[in-house]
Image (tube, helix red, strand yellow):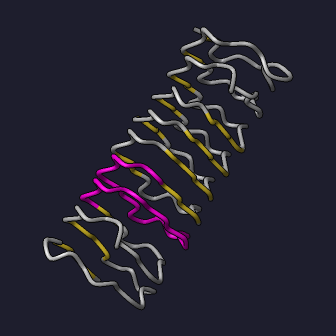
Amino acid sequence: MFRMRDNKFRKLWDGVQNLENLKVIDLKGSFYLNDIPDLSKATKLERVILAECHCLTQLIISNSTLKFLDLSECSQIESLNVHSKYLSQLNLVGCSSLTKISVASDELTELILDGMGNLESLNVNTRSLEELKLHGCSSLKEISVASEEITILDLSSTPITSLSISSLPKLTYLDLRNCGNLVSLPELPSALYGECL
């Protein structure tokens, strides 16, 4: 475990370090931290906690073993790109500056991004996602979601103009209330229960 909460570091180290036995990184409250180094050599990494790292503006992690990522209250982060086969928990509460999110995981089951007013683009590719809630994401323009398991999709009060759900065979609940810019809908699954417009 690498744990250094509430430190004053701006960066951790240069280059790629051999971290093959590292499983947990906990840097919660590292207010000045603005860069996360390459973690590709941390082949056993499972948990990364970066909550309250207010100076972090972007994060790119490609690590197939990562299961848990906490970015709560990272108020300045603007872009997130995470590729991890086993990522199941992603906490983005309070990430009010996020405009672009790209997540690829086989295990992610729930993603709640309610009220993220700056979010413009969302790309989620996961086989196991069951719930996606984007209520009140008032800048959302692009949505790409691929999941064979998703049952709940909440896009209420977002400015989306079109929607494709052909790849969501298990969708049973769709909320499109207050989507005033929506101009077209595809054929909806027969089992779908939705609150539309």
**Residue 141 picture location, percent across and down:** 55, 73
In magenta segment, residue 63: no
- Vertical arrangement, residue 177 with respect to residue 72, above or below: below
Q: Which residues are magenta?
A: 125-152
Q: Is residue 124 depicted above or below 164 in this figure?
A: above
Indicate the quadrant containing the C terminus: top left, top right, bottom left or bottom right: bottom left
Instruction: Give the number of marks.
Output: 0
Instruction: Describe residue 26's horizontal placement relative to residue 137 as left or right.
Output: right
Does residue 141 belong to the magenta stretch? yes
- Relative height, residue 139 to residue 52 (above, below): below
Q: Position of residue 83 (x, y in %)?
A: 57, 41
Q: Position of residue 194 (x, y in %)?
A: 20, 74
Q: Quadrant location of residue 179?
A: bottom left
Residue drawn at (67%, 40%), measured in percent from left and top? 60
Q: Residue at x 36, y 56 (%)?
A: 147
The residue depicted at 41 percent of the width and 41 percent of the height is 106
Image point 69% across, 25% down: which residue? 39
What type of secondary structure mainly makes up the magenta span?
loop
Which residue is most to the bottom?
183
| Farthest residue, direction left | 191
